[in-house]
Structure formats: C-alpha cells, structure tokens
C-alpha cells in the first residue's frame, strides 16, 4: 500500500507553516497576552510575524521587564532603548497603554512617549510612577481627547488654563497624585461622561465637591475634611473609608447627605467615615427623612459609638436591604464605658418596633466582642428578617474567647423570623463565609 501523499505548501515536502497563516486577529490576540519583551522576540518566527508587535493596539511596559532580563544594563538604559523602539517602530493606532515603572528613579523620554500617545488616539491609559519621584504630566497629556479610561499614580497634575476636561472619559482612578481640590473638582466636572471614580489620596484634602451627572461608582480612600455629593443622581455604589482621622473635619448634615443619594445600591463606610458625616452619636437621626429604597448591600467598619448609631439609622432607613456586613474594631472597654452613659442599647429594639427587614438574606459580623449592643443587634436581625438565609458571626479573638462565644450563642437562641436561617458562630469565619451558600 502506498503511503498517503504528504500535504505540501509552497515547496515540495515541507509542512504547512501554520504560524504564518494564522488570521491577523488571532496573532494580535496572542501578542497582547505576552510580555512586551516576548512579543518583540516573535519577530524571529517568520517573515509574516516580523514587526507584528509594532502594530499592536495595546502595549504594557512594567517592572516585570526589568526582572525578566538577565543582561547587565541598568533599568534606565533598558527603558530608554525600549522607548526608542516604540517611538520609532510602532505604527497605527495605540488605544491602550500601561506604563508602570515604580522601580525607576529617572524618567527618560516619558514626555516624548506622552506626546506620541496623544497623537495616536489613546483611549485607555495607565501611568504609575515611583512614590519618591512623582512625574509631572506634560501639556501634551491634556490633549488626549479620546481618553475613555485613565489611571494615574504618583503624578503631579497641573493642567494648562485652556484645559476643559476629557469629553469621552468614562472611568478615572487617581492614586497618590498631587492636585489641588479646585483642579480636581474641575477635572471631574469637565468630564461629563464619567461613570466610575476612584480617589486614593494620602495628602490631606480640604472641601471636595463632586458634580458628575453620570457617575455610578465612587470609591474614596484618604484624608479629607468634607465631601459634598451635590449632583450625582445616578450614583449606585459609594465607598467612604478614611486612612486617618482629621480632628478639624467639617461636618455635613447627615440626613441631607443621604437625601442626595436616592439611587444608592451599595454603601461601604469604614474607619473615619463618621468624622465628616457626624460629630457624634447625638447628631444621627433615628431614621432618614427619605428612605434609601434602592440600597441592597451595606458594609460598615465599627470603630466608635457613632458608627453603631450610623449603622442602625441606615438599616432602619433601607427597607429593601439584602446583605449586611459589619466589622468591629472597637475596644471592648471603650465601648462598654461609652455605652454606660448612653441609652443606645435599651433603645435598639424599641427603635425597630415598626421595622421589618423583609428582604434581608445574609448577615456577616466580624470581631464581635459580646457586649450588650452587639447582642441586641444579633437578636434584632434574627427576629426581624423573615427571609434570612445566613448569619456568620466571628467572635473577637481577644481574651476570654470561650465566654464571649457562649454569650453570642445564647443571643442566637431567640425565636427567629426565618425558619431557613443558618447561624454560624465560629473562629473559622473565613471558611464558612466562602463555603456556605
């Protein structure tokens, strides 16, 4: 029997060059998943692959490049060579570019790169620099008119007077940037399509007013005196943790603050949030004048007595709440001393006499000390939640753990509104949180 005839391509007896015949979109997909150095090296595969990387619409240049190379050149020299190749060889639009060079102390050719990107329809830009040498953005950066997504870390932002924002910007992420409150407000308000805003600011900021009619998600971390959310009608996700306290914080009207957040669905309040929301527990109303009818998820870190008052007020004011997470980081002695002088504990159950949490399904309580207000809260949630499926309680790991756990278990023996509620009290909290449906 004659052997089957070998398939031929071009020259007799040679196998088909499958790499060279891959569709263009497949080649681009492969190259965009490779580190830049490996993408450049694909030029040796065949003539059709030569300089394919030069037409990629997405490029990433980060610190991994310095770690993967084994030559003796300094990172600055390597970076300069790569920048030269990109600026001289790349052709066609470059829509996404990531530059993360926290390991470099000198930024050679960066201004030329920014100018190059501004001329190539850049839409998604990530610029991350070292904390010891913040990079001052050049004038050409503010001419990137096609920007949709922007991430800046350790940059100095000082736009020219003629700058009127990024008309197409959809998401903005600023981490440890140098910018005045006034300029930051202008940058946000001059970006009318902005939907997602992340601010991580280590420097102390003054008053910040957010005007963003299309904003849907706002995540703030930092140190600020006052935040005003005056024009955010579509805001559905809000995160307001602070890194440290500001004793001179200006206080807003707690009730009015939430009146402007009628579309809110997910609220996260962490350490220090109360410092620009309220001055103390006495200023927190029992219930908001306008209920949060869309709020479904509520996360809060409890550091002070005011945090408990805030949590109770917001739970009372959220008739459609589905998930509650609380982390207790207060000192047991501190809370006990403060609560002795307040009527908060005795009023917890009474203040919920006309409230039923008909949509609450999951509750997670971490770091519970077993003091009276926490036990009352556990009883309240069990007796007022007919749809409750899961309650996970992680007792604090401080002294007298067994006695604390026994107190918590006793509180869970109340008559539950939901026959399906699964209550777990354990130091294996993380395991149950990940495995319990």
Image (cartoon, helix red, strand yellow):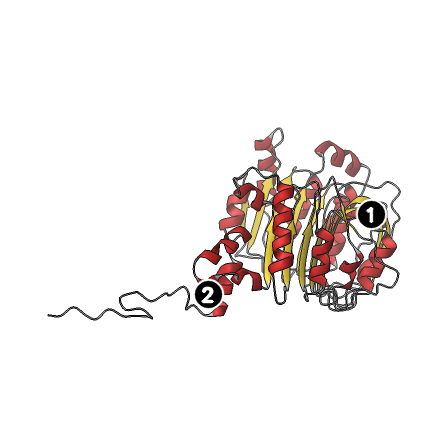
Q: Using the image as rendered, state which of residue 320 and residue 257 is in the foreground.
A: 257
Q: Is residue 208 above or below residue 74?
A: below
Q: Is residue 398 above or below residue 135?
A: above
Which residue is under mark 2? 48
Q: Using the image as rendered, state which of residue 295 and residue 421 is in the foreground.
A: 295
Q: Look at the image and tell me whether residue 47 can be seen.
A: yes
Q: Is residue 127 left or right of residue 31?
A: right
Residue 210 occupies quadrant: bottom right
Q: Position of residue 330 (x, y in %)?
A: 72, 37
Residue 202 occupies quadrant: top right
Q: Look at the image and tell me whether residue 219 can be seen.
A: no
Mark nearer the N terminus (1 vs 2): 2
Label 1: element kind: strand
Q: Comparing marks 1 and 2, which lies closer to the viewer?
A: 2
Question: In the picture, which quadrant includes the N terminus?
Answer: bottom left
Q: Is residue 5 left or right of residue 270?
A: left
Q: Which mark is residue 29?
A: none
Q: Which residue is located at x 75 percent, y 36 percent?
A: 335
Q: Using the image as rendered, state which of residue 310 and residue 213 is in the foreground.
A: 213
Q: Which mark is residue 224?
A: 1
Q: Is residue 160 left or right of residue 28?
A: right
């Amino acid at each position: 029997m004659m052997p089957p005839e070998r398939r031929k391509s071009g020259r007799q007896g040679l196998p088909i060059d499958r790499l060279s015949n891959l569709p263009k979109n497949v080649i681009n997909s492969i190259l965009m998943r490779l580190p830049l150095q490996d993408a450049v090296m694909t030029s040796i595969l065949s003539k059709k692959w030569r300089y394919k990387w030069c037409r990629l619409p997405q490029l990433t240049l980060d610190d991994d490049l310095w770690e993967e190379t084994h030559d003796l050149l300094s990172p600055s020299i390597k970076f300069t060579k790569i920048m030269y190749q990109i600026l001289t060889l790349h052709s066609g639009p470059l829509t996404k570019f990531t530059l993360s060079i926290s390991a470099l102390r000198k930024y050679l050719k960066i201004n030329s790169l920014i100018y190059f990107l501004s001329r190539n329809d850049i839409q998604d830009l990530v610029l991350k620099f070292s904390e010891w040498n913040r990079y001052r953005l050049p004038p050409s950066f503010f001419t990137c008119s096609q920007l949709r997504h922007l991430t800046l870390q350790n940059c100095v932002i000082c736009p020219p007077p003629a700058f009127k924002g990024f008309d197409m910007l959809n998401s903005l992420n600023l981490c440890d940037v140098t910018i005045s409150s006034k300029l930051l407000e202008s940058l946000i308000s001059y970006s009318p399509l902005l939907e997602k805003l992340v601010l991580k600011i280590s420097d102390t900021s003054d008053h910040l007013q957010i005007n963003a009619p299309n904003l849907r998600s706002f995540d703030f971390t930092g140190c600020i005196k006052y935040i005003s959310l005056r024009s955010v009608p579509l805001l559905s996700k809000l995160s307001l943790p602070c890194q440290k306290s500001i004793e001179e914080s200006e206080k807003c009207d707690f009730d009015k603050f939430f009146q402007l957040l009628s579309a809110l669905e997910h609220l996260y309040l962490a350490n220090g949030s109360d410092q620009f929301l309220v001055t103390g527990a006495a200023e927190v109303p029992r219930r908001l004048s306008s209920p949060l009818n869309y709020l479904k998820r509520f996360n809060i870190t409890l550091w002070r007595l005011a945090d408990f008052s805030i949590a109770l007020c917001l739970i009372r004011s959220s008739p459609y709440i589905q998930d509650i997470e609380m982390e207790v980081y207060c000192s047991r002695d501190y809370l006990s001393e403060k609560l002795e002088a307040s009527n908060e504990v005795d009023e917890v159950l009474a203040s919920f006499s006309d409230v039923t949490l008909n949509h609450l399904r999951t509750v997670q309580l971490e770091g519970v000390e077993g003091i009276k207000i926490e036990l009352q809260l556990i009883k309240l949630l069990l007796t007022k939640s007919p749809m409750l499926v899961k309650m996970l309680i992680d007792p604090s790991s401080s002294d007298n753990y067994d006695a604390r756990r026994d107190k918590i278990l006793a509180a869970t023996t109340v008559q539950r509104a939901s026959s399906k509620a699964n209550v777990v009290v354990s130091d294996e909290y993380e395991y149950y949180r990940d495995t319990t449906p």
